[in-house]
Image: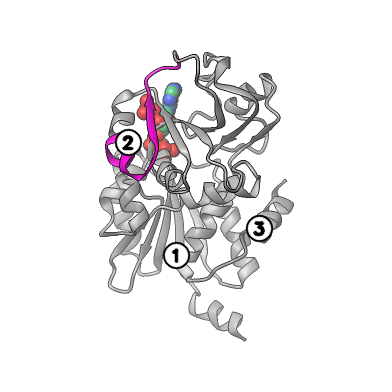
Amino acid sequence: LEKLYIMIINKNVLYSVFGNPINHSLSPLIHNFFSEYSGIHYDYNAKLIEIDSFEKCISIFFQNKYAKGANITAPFKNKAYFLSDHLTDRAFIAGSVNTFKKNKNNIIIGDNTDGVGILYDLKRLNYLEKKKISKILILGAGGAAKGIIPVLLQDGHNVFVYNRTIKKTKEIYKNLNMLGNLCILNNFDDKKLLFDCIINTTSCIFDPIFEYFPYNLFSINTVFYDICYNLNCDTSFLVWCKKRGALNCSDGLGMLISQAAYSFLLWFNCLIHIDDLINYVFKKIL
Ligand code: ATR
């Protein structure tokens, strides 16, 4: 009866993910599964938006009285931060937003669930051991990296950031340095760099940008995580680390499901068992 009641009150509510590109997105499929799994009915679709029309599209979307929330993906997470009327603490710290929620007064709240999403998945995979401080290399310094870095620092890890555009890593250092042990790298010349965990947050799913990275960054014990995912073949990051003998590497499907579950929690105040969801979605998709 409780489920039926929720289904009735949520009839016609609308959620969407905005990005460019967006046609590869599995978020609509995942949210359909969440809806099926929880009994909470909501429509969720994907919208491609032109690079210069983000603000306009979001404003039009939320003028619809049924539009209650959205996910924001590359390359709009930084713009979403500035568009939010209010920010959750973690979105404020990150300086980037991947989830919007419209409240009763039509106020748009910006949240960031990327950090909690990846932390959940790294722990699920045993990539971050309990009570051990890991030395983590983050590749990329865009909106996704900004969501992830504070959560890893707050979990006690030593975080190093490398990005093509050095200005962005400097900005991250200035904003997040006080949260923990953060270091920026302008190159990989230091021969003593050896990481427990390397995470790709760049938006390069297939560009072979990793080919030139040196071998001394990892050992047989290093774990690799790509926040990108592709169901048909390995991403260029996974190709790179597998070619070099990586034993433990994962794409970002688990993170995608966990960050979606935290968005779901924000929207519906409903906590769902993330491991169950991951198994459920994996069974359906893979
Ligand atoms: P997201 O929200 O997914 O983080 P984003 O904010 O557009 O998307 O950030 C994309 C990231 O991928 C950036 O770190 C970007 O590097 P720059 O800051 O130098 O632009 C990185 N990236 C994208 N294309 C790249 C490429 N061809 N080589 C190296 N890095 C690239």
The vertical placement of 64 against 139, above or below, is below
Can you say which quadrant of the picture contains the C terminus? top right
Q: Is residue 226 left or right of 286 when viewed as pictured?
A: left
Three-letter residue code for mark 3: Asp
Q: Mark 1 highlights which residue?
A: 266
Q: Position of residue 177 (x, y in %)?
A: 32, 39
Q: Nearer the viewer, residue 72 or 174?
A: 174
* Element assignment for label 1: helix
Which x, y percent locates residue 101? 38, 63
Whole-number angstrom distance, CA of label 3 to CA of label 1: 18 Å
Q: Residue at x 28, y 72 (%)?
A: 105
Amino acid on which disc 1 is placed: Leu
Kindly report which numbered mark, 3 or 1, lies closer to the viewer in this rendering.
Answer: 3
- CB of mark 2 within 8 Å of CB of mark 1? no
Q: Position of residue 172 (x, y in %)?
A: 32, 36
Residue found at x 32% / y 43%: 78
**Crowd rating for badge 2 (residues with CA inside 10 Å; few <14, some 14–19, many 20+):** many
> Does residue 20 appear anywhere in the picture?
no
Instruction: Give the vertical position of 22 relative to 61 (above or below).
Output: above
Give the extent of the magenta segment: 173-188
Q: Which residue is mark 3?
A: 275
Instruction: Please tell me which residue is depicted at 63% across the width and 60% down the height of the picture.
Output: 33
Crowd tier of the residue under label 1, counting other residues whose Cα lies within 10 Å: few below 14, some 14–19, many 20 or above: some
Percent of width and height locating residue 151: 44, 48
Residue 24 lies in what quarter of the image?
top right
Q: Residue 233 colored magenta?
A: no
Q: Which mark is residue 172?
A: 2
